[in-house]
Amino acid sequence: MTITTAAPALPDDQIVELMVQVPPGQVIKYDLAALASAFEIADPGRIAVETDGSRHALVTVYPSNPLTEMPPPSAEDMLMDAHGRIVVGRYHNGRPARRRLFDPSTGSAVRALTFGTTGAGKSRTVQYMLACEKRNGIVSWYGDLKGGQSAPEARGQVDWIATSPEEVILMLRAAVAVAQQCRQPRYTALGRNAFLIGDPDPLLSVRVDEANRLLEKGAPYRDEGTYLVKELGRTGRSVGIGEELDAQAGHLEELGGSDTLRAMLKEGEVTLLRWSSSMMRQLVADGLLPAGTQLVPIPKSLKPRTLRSQFAAGADDDDDVCDTQGMAYLLSGQHPTSMMRHFRIGSIRPMPGLDPEILALYGPGTPARLEESSLDAAGEAYDARGTAAMAALCEAVKDQQEKQEAKAQATRGGRGAALLADRIRAVLAEVEDPMSPDEIHVLVNADGGPEVKSVGSVRNALGVLADAGDVARAARGLYEIAR
């Protein structure tokens, strides 16, 4: 027999808060749709559920969705408080939602991740963070891998904006050099193991937007990009260089496939905007959320779904505008399961050019610049930022990558297995003196490909290559690449 208990009737104009719990030994779980049905609420956005990950949950029911409208930020919201935090928006209960730019208690720069599907408001969130960095005297290096379209207003408002994979690689190289070749030795000489803003250097923030385009499987600079992000995370934090990756997915493969990188970044500030159906499982699996954590899904639209007759007049005329941009969870904050919404950033309607409201957010004056003592470490790429000279440097990066790829392909066969003839050619191309089959056999087996067990196989392949003119017999039993 099933016993059904009706939920209490709720007043229409009041906020109702319920504290619920399950018996010891159980973990609380809930179904938002069922909960809304029990209270006879058509709009699930009126219900906010926050759990402690164990037995208890706090259920808040609002007269209307409290996150429907959000004001723009104030100048005070954008300034760091004594704990290095800025206000990025409001929780459903109206309290400020804060994100850290710097941790003064440990003297550490911040590492951060921001995830969100297309249309979730990631670009506006990035604009706000860049504007806050400028207002707080932080040096901003911004890689926009959407060709500069994600945040066009940032040009001229940050110290360095990179808009191609090659320039982002140059930017990351420069940041690692500043950390390891300049700041780290200087701070070691001072006996300092933490960072103080402005004493003597400014805080530096390195952000890569659309980071999946740099780090996803198959991206040309994936290996180097992953390495540089990891190196910056390891050494930058204590010398005042923070980093942030903004991506459309939370999957490990989208971020370099590196457990080390993900483990490093998840200790920082993690913001989850509207996500895909599989992202939640991935976040829990990767340890970004405790096992059993449930988050209320962020819908594409705040408009409640209403069943209408298929033959009703105007049934196809409903406005399907996506109006949940900026809604998110601050997973690293004090209320990780409590939904918040970022401030309204920029004009409500699309603009034909640069958005004047976003430009106003950055405020007057020029952005903070890298300290003079680190200019040599940052190198010619930093000097060339924003100039025509950058194109030549990017071409050099591209040429370097193409040569590395060609070299790798020379040791791979059509199905990914290395062909012995290609591997022999690659070995001989790297040396100047003629070599014997035994010497070539040793180097071929050191190239990382499948083991060649018999030197006789090498001799046979050398004979074929010599007959084809690819290698030359320099002397009896010695071979060299045909020049």
Image (spheres, helix red, strand yellow):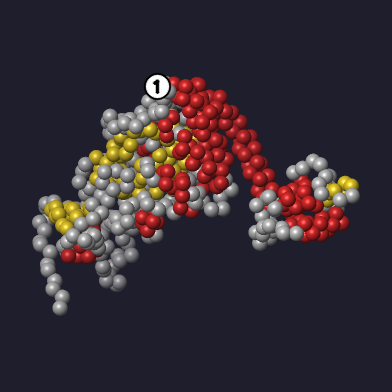
Query: Looking at the picture, does residue 116 appear above or below residue 380?
Result: below
Q: Secondary structure at mark 1?
A: loop
Q: Is residue 296 left or right of residue 255?
A: left
Query: Looking at the picture, does residue 450 appear above or below residue 266?
Result: below
- Amino acid type at circle 1 is Asp
Q: Which one is in front, 339 or 236?
A: 236
Residue at the far bottom: name it.
1
Query: Looking at the picture, does residue 127 appear above or below residue 258?
Result: above
Q: Is residue 255 left or right of residue 125?
A: right
Near mark 1 (Cα within 10 A), the count class, few <14, some 14-19 or many ≥20, is few
Seen at 81% across and 57% down, the residue is 459
Q: Which one is in front, 433 or 144?
A: 433
Pointer 1 residue: 199
Tally of numbered tags: 1
- Residue 25's x, y, as percent? 21, 61
Seen at 15% across and 78% down, the residue is 1
Q: Is residue 104 left or right of residue 478?
A: left
| Residue 264 visible to the viewer | yes
| Residue 358 visible to the viewer | no
Seen at 53% across and 42% down, the residue is 227
Q: Is residue 455 left or right of residue 112?
A: right
- Residue 472's x, y, as percent? 86, 49
- Residue 325's x, y, as percent? 34, 49
Query: Looking at the picture, does residue 462 appear above or below residue 382?
Result: below
- Residue 433's x, y, as percent? 81, 42
Q: Which one is in front, 477 or 261?
A: 477
User: Which corner quadrant holds the C terminus?
Assistant: top right
Seen at 29% across and 39% down, the residue is 98
The answer to which quarter of the image holds residue 76 is: top left
